[in-house]
Amino acid sequence: PGGRRRRGRLSVTRFARGRKGGRWWESTTASIQTRKGIAAGMMARVGLVRGGVALPGVRAGRQRRRVRRFRPSSTVRARAMAERNEVLEQILRSIREAEASNAEPDFFDLLGIEVGTSDSQTIKNSYRERARRCHPDIAGEDGHYACVVLNEAYATLMDDELREAYEVERTVSAHTATSGGERDNLRDMSAQDTDIGDALRRVPYTGEPLSKVVPADHWACKVESEEQLSKAVFVDEISCIGCQYCVTCSPATFRNVEPHGRARVFGQWLSTEDEIQEAIDMCPVDCIHWVPKEQLAPMEYVIQHVLTDRVGVASLMSGQGSHRMADPFQKTQEFLKFLSQREERRERFINDRKRRARAKEQKEEMKKERDERRRRNRQKWWG
């Protein structure tokens, strides 16, 4: 009978009697010899060494030497892990302390460089070292959060203009100016207008509208003429009583927001002009207005982040609490004036710093020229 039988690593095929002319013994013997030769050749190629003596039949030149790879000890690995954790904890501590005080983290401290460093190579090397230690694949979720802030710090400090602007903001917020003139130029504007200063520290102003603005070629945009693109709709949430008439007339444009239930513009031109105008006409307190498009962003920022105090609807309807109601249009003018003055002070301070830096460079160049002239005269007279 035929079949397959394993003997160690050699597989021997048994042929039935009468097959291939009855020469199954010769076939089996040849197969075993062939397999033994292959095994011997493989052992010869491997060339194992036992006790410094090669196996029989193995050439000395074919011996394979085991190369031991360097593996750091457990102490070295533990020390590297501790350093990585220490750097990560330092970065997270700086970020959390800044968030607790409603301020931006110190980018120089995050990258571990001196304040005022402008060498791009130094900033890049420090960033790469910190990013390697805080990589999310190594540090997990905390590392991802730290890398996001590190990327922002790196992008800011690598750009010359952004770095100068950041240094000015850092100087203003930390009040590090020493002379009286600089203190007057860098004093915090929140001392003059607390609500605007607090709002800007809490939520930075981006210059973009807070309501949704869809492109003119979007299917949801209901703009029909170029004139409509130059204006936008705005809701005075302070005087709104939450009647929901505007939401009924134009549900795509207006929403009622919690917790006061006042109306707010959800998106610009998500309804036709007739529907929006109908909502304006239906408002019993005239709190919905058409405004120029360029004034929409500051007005929405003021109404949502600066004038956050709201009078209850019951008190509003009974005529009480009017002394707590501010005019959003007048406040927006104050807000724009505040931004303009702050920008002027920042530019003035940056120009003063550049002027002092140029004066310092000129002074150093004059000193070098004077020293070089003295050295030449000394060589001329004294040989």
Image (cartoon, grey):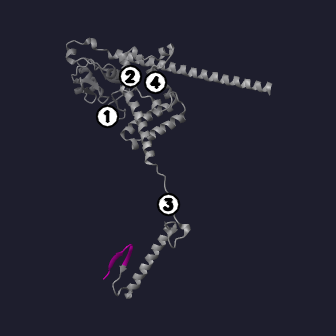
Which residue is tagged 3?
66
Q: CA distance from mark 4 to mark 2?
A: 15 Å
Residue 82, relative to residue 330: is it above or below? below
Q: Is residue 234 visible?
A: yes
Q: Earlier in the sequence, mark 4 or mark 1?
A: 4
Mark 1 burial class by Cα count in 10 Å: few <14, some 14-19, many 20+: few
Q: CA distance from mark 2 to mark 1?
A: 33 Å
Q: Main secondary structure of the magenta part?
A: strand
Q: How many marks?
A: 4
Residue type at tag 3: Arg
Mark toward the viewer: 1 or 3 = 3
Q: CA distance from mark 3 to mark 2?
A: 66 Å
Residue type at tag 4: Arg
Which residue is tagged 1?
220
Can you give x and y, in whole percent of width and height, for residue 113 in the image?
Answer: 50, 31
Which residue is tagged 2?
200
* Label of residue 170 in the image: 4
Q: CA distance from mark 4 to mark 3?
A: 59 Å
Can you give x and y, in whole percent of width and height, for residue 46 in the image?
Answer: 49, 67
- SS assignment at label 4: helix
Q: Is residue 278 visible?
A: no
Q: Earlier in the sequence, mark 4 or mark 3?
A: 3
- SS assignment at label 2: helix
Residue 37, relative to residue 167: is it above or below? below
Q: Earlier in the sequence, mark 2 or mark 1?
A: 2
Q: Nearer the viewer, residue 62 or 113?
A: 62
Evaluate if marks 4 and 2 touch, with contact meaning CB atoms under 8 Å apart. no
Can you give x and y, in whole percent of width and height, for residue 179 in the image?
Answer: 51, 15
Mark toward the viewer: 2 or 1 = 2
Can you give x and y, in whole percent of width and height, for residue 213 in the image?
Answer: 35, 30
Evaluate if marks 4 and 3 touch, with contact meaning CB atoms under 8 Å apart. no
- SS assignment at label 1: loop
